[in-house]
Image: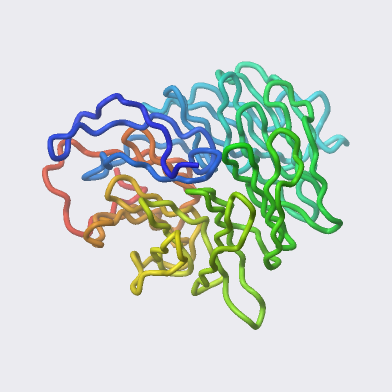
Amino acid sequence: AGAALDDDPAPDRRSVGGLARRRITHWTQLHGGPAHANLRERSDAIVSPRIAWTAPGAAGEPAVSGGDLYAVGAALQRIDAATGRVLAWRAAGEADPVAPGGGDEPRALAYVGGAAIGPAAVLARRTDGAVAAWDRALARRLWLRPLDPPTGGEAVPGVLVRDLYVCGSGASVVALDAGTGETRWVHRLPAGDAVDVVPAAAGELVVIATRVGQVAALELASGRPAWRTELVPGLGGPDPVVVDGRVLVADRGVRAERRGALHALALEDGELLWTHVYGAMDLATPGVGRGELFAHSAREVVVVDPATGAAAAEPEQRTGRGCGAPPLLVGNTLYSADREGFLYARSRERGELAWAFWVPGGSIDRFAYVDGRLLVTTSTGLFALEDDPAAERLPRGLVLRADAR
């Protein structure tokens, strides 16, 4: 699997060094694609940021294709990516033949994590574990497949790979036909185990990381294991990433022994290549750079060599407490966020902070870069940040507030 996602060749309005920037016009599922390698190769179009539009109530990681943005939360929303106008809104329990959970009062439902966009359908997972498929206009629900959340855990989205949607269900991993919702295969886990993270996929393999510490590569066509590797319990939170023939998974540490760690395994056979111990147990899914990884834990983002696991002596970025979304490299800009409501844009080349986005009293959930805009979901809704063409110079240390008018 390559580290970069495909992009659209349409040139941007600006250029750098005489070379036209190119817009990347899609981000079709969590982390941008099935391998979760989130590198954006092109130059960052945002020089001086401003808020283009907001969408209150939109949650999860946005998915974008063909000018349509899909957000989750209490409803699955279709939003015009250029203007922020809501084009369609479908409540999580809409079109159910009976009240979810039975009884007179339906349970409160929501869509979780983020949607996945296929050629003819948009798929999203609900808090009760069910997977729903809607047409791209959200005019008609195509199918609803009841599944269970992971045993003893909460439902997380699946990964869309060609015509399959693969996700955890109870103590199993299930592959659904994206066109019909029918089961194509089931991989059963040992009793007491479950998948609490979004699977990743590359080539003919789907990679899972389980609660008891097992990493496995399943054949995409059949669900049969190609290999299994035992690590340590606690492979939950950060999602696995596949890049340059390596599988990256993280754990939350071993009690009384060490803090959380990032592991690299060979995609071919599951051999453990290296382990990098973080400085904390609060970890984010690693971000992917050009021949480097960005590991975010606690109050820092550290550059890690993907070949050896060696970390740079000094952190690439200092942040506030906590971490959530993976660091994201766009051109020469490295984006990261903490749990104190700040998103940081820092020059990867010079290491200096260019600007920050702040949600006073709130938090940053996810972000994605599409079509020259940074799409940021927060505790108060979705913000589309873009470059302000009228700004001649970026004030040093600019902090753009979410409540700015």
**In the displayed structure, would residue 78 be above or below residue 137?**
below
Q: At which x and y percent is residue 297?
A: 48, 66
**In the displayed structure, would residue 258 be above or below residue 163?**
below
Q: Nearer the viewer, residue 32 or 153?
A: 32
Lateral position of residue 390 relative to residue 198, left or right: left
Does the rendering let one see residue 282? no
Q: Nearer the viewer, residue 216 or 348?
A: 216
Residue found 62% across the figure and 60% down from its top: 271
Q: At which x and y percent is residue 400?
A: 29, 51
Report which quarter residue 374 is drawn in: top left
Number of dots carrying numbers: 0
Q: At which x and y percent is residue 214?
A: 71, 59
Residue found 55% across the figure and 56% down from its top: 248
**In the displayed structure, would residue 158 be above or below residue 244?**
above
Does the rendering let one see residue 388? yes
Residue found 84% across the figure and 38% down from its top: 101
How is the rendered protein coloured? rainbow
The C terminus lies in which quarter of the figure?
A: top left
Residue found 76% across the figure and 53% down from its top: 194
**In the displayed structure, would residue 101 be above or below residue 229?**
above
Q: Nearer the viewer, residue 79 or 6?
A: 6
Lateral position of residue 329 relative to residue 107, left or right: left
Q: Nearer the viewer, residue 272 or 106?
A: 272
Q: At which x and y percent is residue 285?
A: 52, 55
